[in-house]
Amino acid sequence: MRHTLSVVVENKFGVLARIAGMFSGRGFNIDTLNVGPTLDPNTSHLTIVVRGDDAVLEQVTKQLNKLVDVISIQDFRDDEFVDRELVLMRVKVDAATRSEVMQICDIFRAKIVDVQHKNLLIEITGHEGKINKFLRLMQNFGITDLARTGKLAMSRSEAA
């Protein structure tokens, strides 16, 4: 089972290293990790996706709470949050396939951000399921390069 955690931390040198060290030291695997600033320059927001049962989640939460620089932790459950991911990919095209790739991009609301003679650079954002479906379709044409941000998530309610 995959769990999405929203963690607010103090924006200080070494905080991310301590969090990553806590995960590796305890044998927990991070599926995705995304870190960025918040409106407050003194804090950063981490979205962490971790795989495991409820016992693993409980242990991860307890260990994170022990870290001095952790301000708050929120475990997102179904329908309590909105999540998105950004993907940039380079896809091979030729005269015969270019229009089909462009049509699929249009259907998925993906953006073509760079056009070259033999490839297109595509940007797509959305829920993980949408991204994965789009990737499966693009594999037929040949994905030559790919970069994914990992999941970003935010609570549906203001109170966090």
Image (cartoon, rainbow, N blue to C red):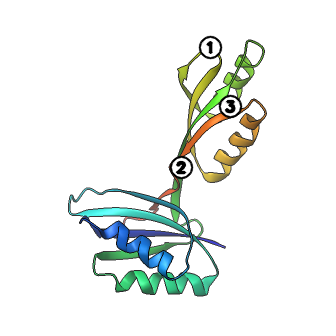
Gap between marks 3 and 1 measured at Cα: 23 Å
Screen quadrant of the N terminus: bottom right
Q: Residue at x 29, y 68 (%)?
A: 14
User: Which residue, given by chain and number where applicable, does mark 2 sit on?
Assistant: 85
Q: Is 24 above or below relative to 101? A: below
Most foreground residue, 32 or 58: 32
> Which residue is at 40% across, 75% downward?
73
> Which quadrant, please, contains the C terminus?
bottom left
Horizontal side of 140 relative to 9 (left or right) equals right
Location of residue 25 in the rendering, given as x and y in whole percent from the top left corner? 48, 80
User: Which of 115 and 1 lies nearest the eye of the viewer?
Assistant: 115
Closer to the eye: label 3 or 1: 1
The vertical placement of 127 against 75, above or below, is above
Q: Earlier in the sequence, mark 2 or mark 1?
A: 2
Mark 3 Cα shell of 10 Å, populated few (<14), some (14-19), many (≥20): few
In the image, 78 versus 26, the foreground residue is 26
Q: Position of residue 78 (x, y in %)?
A: 60, 68
Answer few, some or many: residues within 10 Å of disc 1's Cα (few below 14, many 20 plus, some between 14 and 19): few
The Cα–Cα distance between marks 2 and 1, rounded to whole angstroms, is 28 Å
Does the rendering let one see residue 14? yes
Task: Answer with left or right where residue 15 lies relative to residue 147.
Answer: left
Inter-mark Cα distance, 3 to 2: 18 Å
Location of mark 1 (residue): 117
Query: In this rendering, which labeled residue sits more in front, label 2 or label 1?
Result: 1
Q: Which residue shows up at 49% across the image and 66% down it? A: 48
